[in-house]
Image (cartoon, helix red, strand yellow):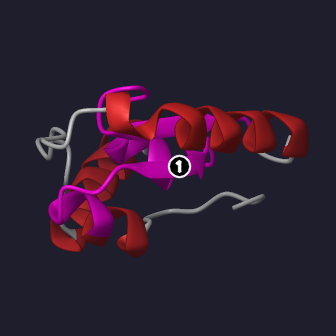
Amino acid sequence: SSYLEAFGLNIAESLAMGKPVLATRCGGAEMQIEDGVNGWLVEPNNMEALAEKMQEISDSFTNYSTHLSTERVISIEEHCKALIKLYETTAH
């Protein structure tokens, strides 16, 4: 994404399947991906960084663990509850 994304359903689905995810730092991805643990994060709108990371992953993919952490996978329900809690604490 090149814009703020509240929740990445495709990210959650991939992580739930134990698949690593490459995404941009646009909100929802940062809540689910721990850079270098269960995927990778690059800055939004930085095509050079994205291309470099894709090349790095492609060049050394067999070095990455096939059993990636899925601890950070959250449901949409959990995400919404966390947002509501955040809004409630900052609204006062």
Looking at the rendered structure, the kind of residue marked 1 is: Leu
**Vertical side of 76 occupied by 46: above or below:** above
The answer to whether residue 8 is seen in the rendering is yes
Question: Which residue lies at the image location 28% right of the left edge and 57% below the top edge?
Answer: 19
Circle 1: element type: strand
Specify start and end residues of the magenta stretch as a single range: 14-43
Q: Position of residue 82 (x, y in %)?
A: 25, 51
Using residue 47 as the reference point, say whether residue 59 is left or right of it: left
Question: Which residue lies at the image location 50% right of the left edge and 62% below the top edge?
Answer: 6
Q: Position of residue 81 (x, y in %)?
A: 20, 60
Using residue 73 as the reference point, say whether residue 39 is left or right of it: right
Residue 15: in magenta span: yes
Q: Nearer the viewer, residue 29 or 65?
A: 65
Quadrant of res 58: top right
Which quadrant would the C terminus be assigned to in this image?
Answer: top left
Question: Which residue lies at the image location 39% right of the left edge and 63% below the top edge?
Answer: 11
